[in-house]
Amino acid sequence: MLSYRTLLISLLCASLAACTAVPNYFNAYKIDVQQGNVLTQEMVAQLKPGQSRDQVRFVLGTPLITDMFHQQRWDYVYRYLDGQTGSVEQRKFSVYFDKDNLLERVAGDVEVATVADLTAPSSRTRVVDLGSLGEGSVPMPEPEGPGFFSRMRSWVGL
């Protein structure tokens, strides 16, 4: 009778343990999911009417969608799902070509550059001097001797 009761109680405890829910403070890690073409404002600012398809592909990358029914339009779609917050960011950008396969117009979430942005000179280079030390700088410390494994190899004779 005692073993029957023990078996019944252990079976009841095991079945109740299987039905418990995971508490809220045990959350599984969810990754950030990034899909599509990442388009920045600088990339879109380089587009000018009259550019060829190859030039547009060089600037923006290969389009995500090339529809066979709308061959004069390329669609760039971007979607980002934040794993921790669950928020979704979406962008859609379309590039339209004329009958001569030259860029005609663009439409979408990313803004096109203004005339001032296109005509303003921009410096894309920057000089970084890594060789000189300025005033008040601390000199580099002397390198330390050989490490533990190097000393052991030399002690063994390798």
Image: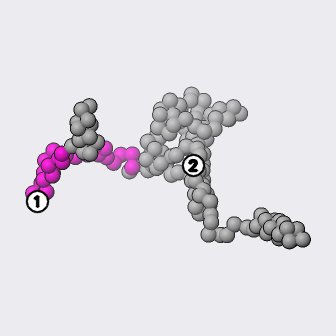
What main secondary structure does the magenta stretch of the protein show? loop
Instruction: Say which of 23 and 132 sits in front.
Output: 23
Instruction: Say which of 36 and 19 sits in front.
Output: 19
Residue 68's label in the rendered image is: none
What percent of the width, then of the height, locates residue 50? 49, 34
Q: Is residue 135 magenta?
A: yes
25 on left or right of 124: right
Residue 136's label in the rendered image is: 1
Task: Give the residue at x 47% y 34%.
Answer: 58
44 on left or right of 75: left
Q: CA distance from mark 2 to mark 1?
A: 46 Å
What percent of the width, then of the height, locates residue 74? 60, 38
Callout 1, which amino acid? Gly
Task: Give the residue at x 46% y 44%.
Answer: 43
For disc 2, the marked residue is: 34
Instruction: Say which of 118 and 16 sits in front.
Output: 16
- Quarter of the image for the C terminus: give it: top left
What percent of the width, then of the height, locates residue 106? 55, 44
Secondary structure at badge 1 equals loop
Task: Tell me where residue 88 sits by quadrant.
Answer: bottom right
Secondary structure at badge 2 equals strand
For the view shown, which residue lies furthest in the top direction?
100
What colour-coding does the image apply? one colour
What percent of the width, then of the height, locates residue 110? 53, 51
Residues in magenta? 117-145
Task: Tell me where residue 96 sits by quadrant.
Answer: top right
Instruction: Say which of 109 and 63 sits in front.
Output: 63
Q: Is residue 89 magenta?
A: no
